[in-house]
Image (spheres, helix red, strand yellow):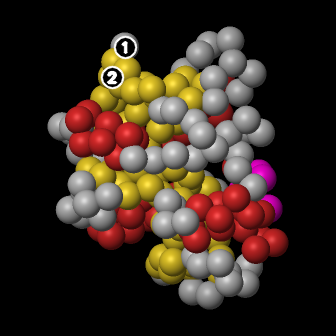
Amino acid sequence: MNLYMKKITADFKETDEWQKINNNAFPKEECMEIEQIIQLIDENIFEVWAFYDKEQFVGYCAMVTDEKTAYIFFLAIDSEKRSIGYGGQGLSLIKKQYSDCQVVVDLEAIEEEAPNITQRKTRRKFYLRNGFFETSYYLKYRGMEMEVLCADENFNKDIFQQLLDNVTIENENYLLYKK
């Protein structure tokens, strides 16, 4: 395995594979169409990175960044290539690429009655196993509650809030709160 990242631009050639990975990775209420992600790239809101193993496209991450925070909005690996280390290596590459930043991710909060509770718990364990820490903070948007994790043990809520205050996607407000 020789994973590397390459920036995705509007002329990305593997859109069909990207769409497949995107559709398989996220619940419908969280999923964003590729055309919309490309628009956010064009508007300089998202930075999107493709993950490749040699020349094979295996996944992507979409991020919102500023000089202090790198917020992983989406991270997805091809469903046929999961559980063999691509996700963990991808996170390592992200942390290296944004080593001067606080790297933050959100994921669906653990709600025992949720229909995908097993998937939620698996995702959470994945991030904790790969160097992310609990922050005790949550985000609310699109009517969903998302738990916030950080690659830095000392999460700086204020600099993350500054990033959120400067991001507008689909006219959504991002409410950050502590539980």
In the image, residue 58 sits, relative to residue 173, either above or below, namely below
Give the vertical position of 170 relative to 134 (above or below).
Answer: below
Can you see residue 11?
A: yes
Image quadrant containing the C terminus: top left
The magenta-colored residue range is: 20-24
Answer few, some or many: residues within 10 Å of disc 1's Cα (few below 14, many 20 plus, some between 14 and 19). few
**Image point (52%, 70%), residue name:** 49
| Residue 128, percent from left and from top | 39, 39
**Prevailing secondary structure class for the magenta stretch in the rendered image:** helix
Q: State the mark number for residue 136.
A: 2
Q: Which mark is residue 179?
A: 1
Q: Is residue 93 part of the magenta span, yes or no?
A: no
Residue drawn at x 65%, y 78% is: 10
Task: Give how far across and how far down residue 152 sits, in percent.
Answer: 23, 45
Residue beneath the point at 57% across and 36% down: 172
Determine the image quadrant of residue 99: bottom left
